Image (tube, grey):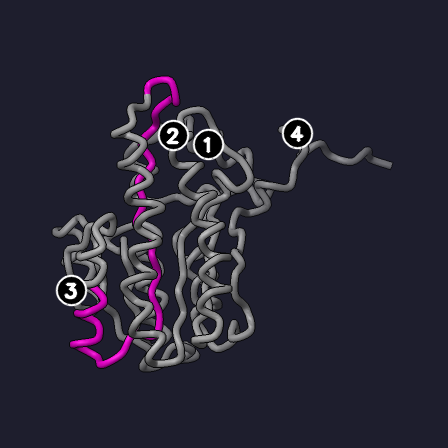
């Protein structure tokens, strides 16, 4: 590996499994020193042990928990160069069956979690005059959606707006703020909670013919966390295998044979 994150301190929130674990693995390969945070303590500690990282149980919907995670990083390593706020929930629930409490729970983790992570890390990064704030958004909300994802779509659209606002406000502190918008990614949760038929239908919607992997998403985060992206802020990278491109479902029609 190229050592693109040598000795950088990275806090990855929502890192026990799936995309967050993929980001942690990729950052570790590139030399980062890691603090991992997740509300799921058992798999979170297992991932931290696997990677030789610090771990702290964190409910990112709580500002105090976000501050405790940042404090662990600074107490252990003396600084915080990068955070990735990846924690998110996406219960399938039609709008007509969504209670105010359900709505608040999803936005509390997904959208308020973004705010909490930024507020907790800002004093440290501001004093350092350097930092990378990174968020997992989604193509769901900013570009597309499905029935049952009203609260999730709203939260991810909100994250994109927050990224732009924070990038503008924090630019004078040497902090960049960006995000990644994954498409359909084959995580453990998808494999557990979706049928083989459903997964096949998702694959059929992707021009590249497969679902993404956590590593595909992690590579985009690696770019944004590295010095290569020092002049990039207030934007998101779509990682979807071309899913947003087709105008119709029959995009694989072959050209006529001459």
- Earlier sequence position, callout 1 versus callout 4: 1
Q: Residue 203: x percent and y percent?
A: 50, 36
Residue drawn at the location 42% of the way across and 26% of the way down:
197
Could you say which disc has been placed on residue 248 in the image? 4
Position above or below: 161 against 66 = above
Q: Quadrant of the N terminus?
A: bottom left
Q: Residue furthest left?
A: 42
Q: Are marks 1 and 4 in contact (CB under 8 Å)?
A: no
Q: Earlier in the sequence, mark 3 or mark 1?
A: 3
Q: Which residue is mark 2?
A: 196
**Comparing marks 3 and 1, which lies closer to the viewer?**
3
Give the CA distance from mark 1 to mark 2. 6 Å
Q: Residue drawn at (42%, 30%), measured in percent from left and top? A: 150
The answer to whether 80 is drawn above or below residue 139 in the figure is below
Q: Residue 69's x, y, as percent?
A: 20, 63
CA–CA distance in space, label 3 to label 1: 34 Å
Residue at the farthest top position: 96
* Vertical placement of residue 34 versus 57, above or below: below
- Number of the front mark, 2 or 4: 4
Look at 26% across and 51% down and name the residue there: 17
Q: Position of residue 29 (x, y in %)?
A: 34, 72
Distance between the alpha carbons at the discs numbered 4 and 3 = 46 Å
- Find out whether the residues at labels 2 and 4 contact each other: C-beta distance under 8 Å: no
Magenta region = 68-97
The local crowd at label 3, few if under 14, some if 14 to 19, many if 20 or more residues have their Cα within 10 Å, is few
Which residue in the protein does label 3 denote? 49
Q: How many marks?
A: 4
């Amino acid at each position: 590996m190229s050592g693109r994150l040598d000795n950088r301190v990275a806090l990855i929130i929502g890192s026990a499994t799936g995309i967050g674990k993929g980001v942690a693995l990729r950052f570790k390969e590139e030399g980062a020193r890691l603090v991992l945070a997740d509300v799921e303590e058992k798999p979170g500690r297992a991932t931290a042990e696997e990677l030789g990282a610090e771990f702290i149980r964190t409910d990112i919907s709580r500002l105090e928990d976000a501050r405790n995670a940042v404090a662990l990083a600074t107490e252990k390593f003396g600084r915080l160069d990068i955070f990735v706020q990846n924690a998110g929930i996406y219960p399938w629930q039609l709008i007509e069956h969504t209670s105010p409490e359900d709505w608040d729970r999803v936005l509390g983790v997904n959208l308020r979690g973004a705010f909490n992570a930024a507020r907790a890390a800002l004093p440290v990064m501001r004093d350092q005059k350097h930092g990378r704030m990174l968020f997992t958004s989604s193509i769901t909300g900013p570009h597309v959606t499905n029935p049952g994802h009203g609260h999730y779509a709203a939260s991810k659209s909100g994250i994109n707006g927050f990224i732009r606002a924070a990038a503008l406000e924090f630019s004078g502190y040497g902090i960049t703020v960006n995000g990644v918008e994954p498409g359909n990614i084959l995580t453990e949760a998808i494999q557990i909670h979706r049928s083989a038929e459903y997964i096949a239908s998702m694959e059929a919607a992707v021009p590249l013919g497969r679902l993404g992997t956590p590593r595909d998403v992690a590579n985009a985060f690696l770019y944004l966390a590295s010095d290569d992206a020092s002049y990039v802020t207030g934007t998101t990278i779509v990682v979807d295998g071309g899913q947003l491109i087709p105008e119709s479902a029959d995009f694989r029609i072959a050209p006529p044979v001459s």
